[in-house]
Image (spheres, coloured by chain):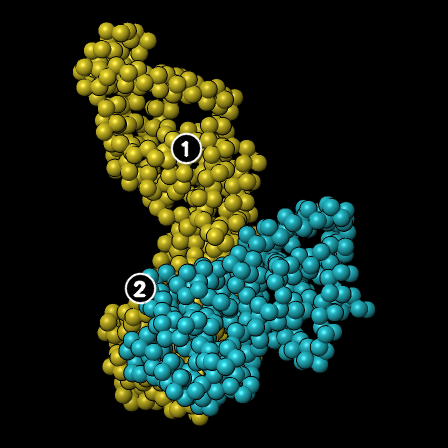
Chain colours: A cyan, B yellow
């Protein structure tokens, strides 16, 4: 029971806080869990023997969860070896190994530290938010601003999306909701200039955190990616060591293209973490595993609903717990 | 990153098969596995893939692939045909109501691009159909969504009906209809708030709007980058609202867009338009066939096949085949065949159309030299009739003469003779293998793979 024990002991460390987090995850991820874990259980019940057919169907379950095809192939290959090595013949026995492998893919050699938002103790921290169109950048910024404000931070937002109609106004509404200042220029102005203003304002107002919004852009538009790189350079020049976080916002419903997004945005802006949004739908969010596995970028925040408090710090244990809650509960019985 | 197209994926398998002369069931199985992976990597839903693969396998095991000399091409062709059929024909018509205004309702998940598409569609209606649409801002939930539509309205110089964020979307839609009638707008495009397909409350709201305005079209706006979940989304929206068509957005990105196939398969509703950019004129009719190629990531391989099909005269090919069978293939036939290849266009262009050609051994750094081809041509043309029919009579003085006549060297002549000899041997082997097995076989005497 190595894996289950490990997981439980992690939860045991800080029970109250964990309880709350995992309830939230369990709720938000209910659909994810139901369909994914449910399918896994179906599969295990249907097949007694661990054979080719079983592995083929397991492959499909994972692919349906939007885990990258290559990640799935590797995983299944490893599982086959493991089953052989441990001489596992019945599907009940392999259940444990499946969960363990999935968790391994996510964590690698790292621990929870990778999930923390990197904030400076005393100085201004700059967070740059990037992503393709319609993933929820502005909404996530609004929620994050609210969260940081709740934590007692002084927050300033910079309205760097000067392109999309209504984007500045949208950020202003979020600014009002979270009760934080929004630095803006007119629509159509140079985003780097807006961010520059934002830095000046954040400094003079002695803010703790500056969150920079940018316009959504498809990663294959070279000009727009260069523009983004320029924005980052302006931040670097004004504050050594900044930006302290470059967050790529990803829509959980996105398929394999999310890998391409993560890769290209990293090339332009050196992405340090991912905000996975819209995880409250039926999308499985399996892409997280693929991105961690193939690009080694951790998820830092997840969007679990439309309310302002529905942005949660990513907790891989809770995430995995959410995915495998059914399995864990069965273990306890 | 493993993101190759089908043609690239098939390279390995094809290499194994090339020269085998016959494709086994096992080979077909391997190829269909590659097809399956390519489709899954393109985000086609796995259930849809399963059905497709079943049909592709059935057709592939049959004669049309297994007895072809170019099984790789044939598999791709079969896959493409199946995909195109599933995607359906081109349909970018928009309904026109007998009693104006014609009402279009835009629905979809958050961030799919409904508001932008609303603006683009209005622009399209005015430009292409000379209509005067009224835009209706029913997204009262997302901050500044109304503002966004109003800005688009200003950019397009078109009226936008809005009542702020406190009004009920159903009432807004209803009142907008009255205004459209009064102002003689012949189209009304209703922009609704993005919502999750599992949010019953908000889905019911859409149904109420639908009941109130009785739309002529309900467009589901879907992000082309959507993964496996596209099936659930499309199914839910269609079940509850009976959508009339789909607009696929963000197709100017580098996604394969397998979602298109999934949506079509589960809803059987046409994908009518494609969003191709951020500007307001970047809305195009959707081309199902192009989408099929895109999903497969196979570039121009199809145009290559088409070229080969149109340029190689069926009758000539049959005669050639006959000659190969009887091993009476001569330099004259060789010349003729070269002419056919040349007709297809510059060789370099042809090579560029073959995916993975640059990976092939021997072709890697070989500059495709059109000159070399003309040298070969010149050598053959410098032969006498007798020599062309029976190269075995070739001796040193004949070779010297030919080299002189064609402006080449004796060693070049020797090389060609040797190559020709090997080619003939190979043909003989293949025909031997085909014996005892009827069928059309060997359609294309040259094999680009």
Corner quadrant of residue A302: bottom right
On the question of residue B45 being in view, the answer is no
Count of labels in the image: 2
Residue B406, position as x, y percentages in the image = 19, 18
Which residue corresponds to mark 2?
Answer: A223
Corner quadrant of residue A230: bottom left
In this rendering, is residue A176 above or below A234?
Answer: below
* Front residue of A34 and B402: B402
Residue B81, position as x, y percentages in the image = 43, 47
Residue at image position (61%, 76%) is A28
Residue A47 got which mark?
none
Residue at image position (24%, 8%) is B398
Residue A15, position as x, y percentages in the image = 72, 78
- Could you tell whether A267 is left or right of A317 in the image? left
**Residue under mark 1: which chain is it in?**
B
**Residue under mark 2: which chain is it in?**
A
Q: Secondary structure at mark 2?
A: helix
Which residue corresponds to mark 1?
Answer: B361
Residue furthest to the bottom = B166
In this rendering, is residue B29 above or below B211?
Answer: above
Q: Secondary structure at mark 1?
A: loop
- Could you tell whether A187 is left or right of A253 in the image? left
* Front residue of A265 and A207: A207
* Front residue of A190 and A62: A190
- Could you tell whether A240 is left or right of B204 in the image? left
């Amino acid at each position: 029971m190595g894996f289950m024990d490990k997981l439980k002991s992690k939860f045991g460390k800080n029970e109250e806080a964990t309880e709350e987090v995992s309830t939230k995850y369990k709720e938000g991820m209910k659909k994810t869990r139901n369909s994914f874990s449910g399918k896994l259980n179906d599969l295990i019940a249907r097949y007694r023997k661990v054979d080719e057919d079983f592995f083929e169907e397991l492959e499909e379950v994972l692919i349906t969860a939007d885990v990258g095809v290559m990640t799935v192939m590797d995983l299944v290959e490893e599982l086959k070896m493991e089953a052989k090595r441990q001489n596992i013949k019945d599907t009940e026995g392999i259940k444990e190994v499946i969960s363990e492998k999935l968790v391994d893919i996510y964590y690698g050699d790292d621990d929870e530290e990778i999930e923390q938002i990197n904030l400076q103790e005393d100085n201004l921290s700059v967070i740059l938010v990037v992503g393709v169109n319609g993933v929820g950048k502005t909404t996530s910024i609004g929620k994050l601003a609210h969260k940081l404000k709740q934590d007692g931070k002084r927050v300033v937002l910079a309205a760097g999306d000067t392109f999309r109609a209504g984007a500045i106004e949208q950020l202003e509404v979020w600014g009002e909701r979270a009760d934080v200042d929004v630095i803006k220029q007119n629509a159509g102005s140079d985003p780097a200039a807006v961010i520059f203003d934002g830095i000046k304002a954040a400094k003079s107002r002695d803010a703790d955190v500056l969150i920079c919004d940018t316009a959504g852009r498809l990663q294959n538009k070279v000009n727009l990616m260069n523009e983004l790189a320029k924005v980052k350079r302006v931040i670097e020049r004004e504050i050594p060591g900044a930006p302290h976080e470059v967050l790529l916002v990803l829509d959980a419903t996105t398929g394999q293209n999310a890998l391409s997004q993560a890769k290209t945005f990293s090339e332009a802006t050196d992405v340090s973490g991912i905000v996975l949004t819209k995880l409250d739908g039926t999308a499985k969010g399996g892409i997280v595993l693929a991105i961690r596995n193939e690009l080694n970028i951790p998820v830092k925040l997840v969007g679990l609903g439309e309310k302002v408090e529905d942005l949660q710090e990513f907790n891989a244990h809770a995430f995995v717990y959410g995915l495998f809650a059914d399995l864990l509960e069965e273990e306890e019985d | 990153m493993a993101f190759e197209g089908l043609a690239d994926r098939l390279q390995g398998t094809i290499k194994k098969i090339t020269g085998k002369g016959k494709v086994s069931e096992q080979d077909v199985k391997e190829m269909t596995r590659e097809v399956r992976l390519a489709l899954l990597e393109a985000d086609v839903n796995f259930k849809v893939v399963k059905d497709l693969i079943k049909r592709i396998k059935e057709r592939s095991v049959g004669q049309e692939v297994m007895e072809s000399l170019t099984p790789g091409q044939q598999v791709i062709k079969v896959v493409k045909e199946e995909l195109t059929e599933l995607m359906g024909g081109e349909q970018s018509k928009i309904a026109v109501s007998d009693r104006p205004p014609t009402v279009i309702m835009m629905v979809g998940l958050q961030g799919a691009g409904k508001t932008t598409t609303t603006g683009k569609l209005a622009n399209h209606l005015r430009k292409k159909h000379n209509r005067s649409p009224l835009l209706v801002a029913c997204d009262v939930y997302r901050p500044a969504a109304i503002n966004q539509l109003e800005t688009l309205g200003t950019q397009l110089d078109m009226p936008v009906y809005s009542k702020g964020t406190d009004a009920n979307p159903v009432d807004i839609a209803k009142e907008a209809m009255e205004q459209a009638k009064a102002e003689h707008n012949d189209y009304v495009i209703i922009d609704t708030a993005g919502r999750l397909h599992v949010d019953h409350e908000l889905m019911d709201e859409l149904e109420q709007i639908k009941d109130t305005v009785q739309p002529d079209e309900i467009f589901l706006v879907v992000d082309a980058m959507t993964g496996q979940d596209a099936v659930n989304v499309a199914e839910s929206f269609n079940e509850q609202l009976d959508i009339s068509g789909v607009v696929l957005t963000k197709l100017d990105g580098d996604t394969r867009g397998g979602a298109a196939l999934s949506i079509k398969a589960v809803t059987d509703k046409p994908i009518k338009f494609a969003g191709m950019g951020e500007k307001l004129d970047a809305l195009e009719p959707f081309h199902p066939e192009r989408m099929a190629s895109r999903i497969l990531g196979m570039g121009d391989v199809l145009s290559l096949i088409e070229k080969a099909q149109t340029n190689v005269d069926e009758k000539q090919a049959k005669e050639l085949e006959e000659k190969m069978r009887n091993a009476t293939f001569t330099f004259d036939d060789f010349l003729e065949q070269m002419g056919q290849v040349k007709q297809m266009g510059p060789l370099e262009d042809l090579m560029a159309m073959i995916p993975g050609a640059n990976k092939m051994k021997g072709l890697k750094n070989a500059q495709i030299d059109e000159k070399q081809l003309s040298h070969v041509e010149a050598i053959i043309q410098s032969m006498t009739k007798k020599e062309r029919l029976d190269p075995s009579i070739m001796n040193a003085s004949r070779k010297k003469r030919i080299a002189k006549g064609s402006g080449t060297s004796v060693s070049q002549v020797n090389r060609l003779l040797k190559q020709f000899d090997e080619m003939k041997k190979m043909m003989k082997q293949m025909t031997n293998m085909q014996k005892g097995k009827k069928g059309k076989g060997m359609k294309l005497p040259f094999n680009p793979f």
